[in-house]
């Protein structure tokens, strides 16, 4: 499907606006670029033909101008020999050539005007094509970046972190259960004589440390 109906549409188009409003901007950008490149080929082909026509007309003008000069010289020669009739014939031939020259020069003017317009169109069209390609490149970079971000997010949040945390929780729970199991062996256990002596020794050590600390504090106040 054609996006632009004619060259003027391309030149006057707002590439960014068209692509921003497109449902499928990447596809639209590709179509735009393809149509612009096709139009460039058409304009250049037309210009090539116009240039060839111009050169052909210029060759004809050169030949006619040479012939015009020759008939003018013949008219003068005929007059110098008293042949007014031949001089008149030469001037008539010269006049016809002048008419052909005028017609070709008019046609040449149209061709040169067309070539100037084509050159301007080509310049503007190339600028639009460059703009469309730059916009397409920008969209490709953004799309590539977005895809990488999505891939990174999927990698980060694909459940492996949650699995690791779950394994850690299970390990911590297992350690807690082992501690509880060890503590359970002390439940209902009667103290032995050695246990009582150990507690007594510990209490004695704490009492000695407490006494020493009180003595130190009392000494520092004096």
Image: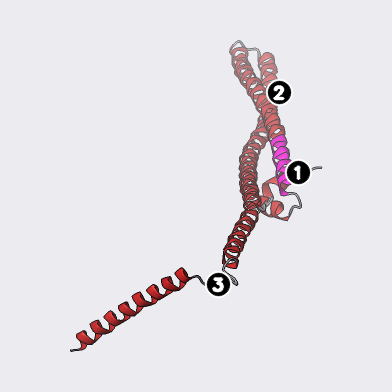
- On the image, the x and y values in percent for residue 101 come to 66, 26
> Looking at the image, which is closer to me, 221 or 96?
221
Q: Circle 1 sits on which residue?
A: 6
User: What residue is rendered at 61% in x and 44% in y?
Assistant: 134
Range of magenta residues: 25-39
Number of other residues with Cα within 10 Å of mark 3, as a class: few under 14, some 14 to 19, many 20 or more: few
Q: Magenta region's main secondary structure?
A: helix
- Determine the residue located farthest toward the top in the rendered image: 81
Counting residues from the start of the chain, the first of labels 1 and 3 encountered is: 1
Q: In the picture, residue 102 is in which quadrant?
A: top right
Q: CB atoms at circles 1 and 2 under 8 Å apart?
A: no
Q: Is residue 72 left or right of residue 42?
A: left
- Looking at the image, the residue that sits furthest to the left is 222
Residue 108 is left or right of residue 202, and the answer is right
Q: Which residue bears the numbered disc 2?
A: 96
Mark 3 and mark 2 in contact (Cβ < 8 Å)?
Answer: no
Q: Quadrant of residue 72?
A: top right
Give the residue at x 76% y 52%: 23
**Residue depicted at x 45% and y 69%:** 194
SS for dot 2: helix
Placement of 38 over or under 160, stated as above or below: above
Q: Residue 77 location in percent, x, y?
A: 59, 12
Of the 4 image quadrants, the one containing the N terminus is: top right
Q: Residue at x 18, y 89 (%)?
A: 222
């Amino acid at each position: 499907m054609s996006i632009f109906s004619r060259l003027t549409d391309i030149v006057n188009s707002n590439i960014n606006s068209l692509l921003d409003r497109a449902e499928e901007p990447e596809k639209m950008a590709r179509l735009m670029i393809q149509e612009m490149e096709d139009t460039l080929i058409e304009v250049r082909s037309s210009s090539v033909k116009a240039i060839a026509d111009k050169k052909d007309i210029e060759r004809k003008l050169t030949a006619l101008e040479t012939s015009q000069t020759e008939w003018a010289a013949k008219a003068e020669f005929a007059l110098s020999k008293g042949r007014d009739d031949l001089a008149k014939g030469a001037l008539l031939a010269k006049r016809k050539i002048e008419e052909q020259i005028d017609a070709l020069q008019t046609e040449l003017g149209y061709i040169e005007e067309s070539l100037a317009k084509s050159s301007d169109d080509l310049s503007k069209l190339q600028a639009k094509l460059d703009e469309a390609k730059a916009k397409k490149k920008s969209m490709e970079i953004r799309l590539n970046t977005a895809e990488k971000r999505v891939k990174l997010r999927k990698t980060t949040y694909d459940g492996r972190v949650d699995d690791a945390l779950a394994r850690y929780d299970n390990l911590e729970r297992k350690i807690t259960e082992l501690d509880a199991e060890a503590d359970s062996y002390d439940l209902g256990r009667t103290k032995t004589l050695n246990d009582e002596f150990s507690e007594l020794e510990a209490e004695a050590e704490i009492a000695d440390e407490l006494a020493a600390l009180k003595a130190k504090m009392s000494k520092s106040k004096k």
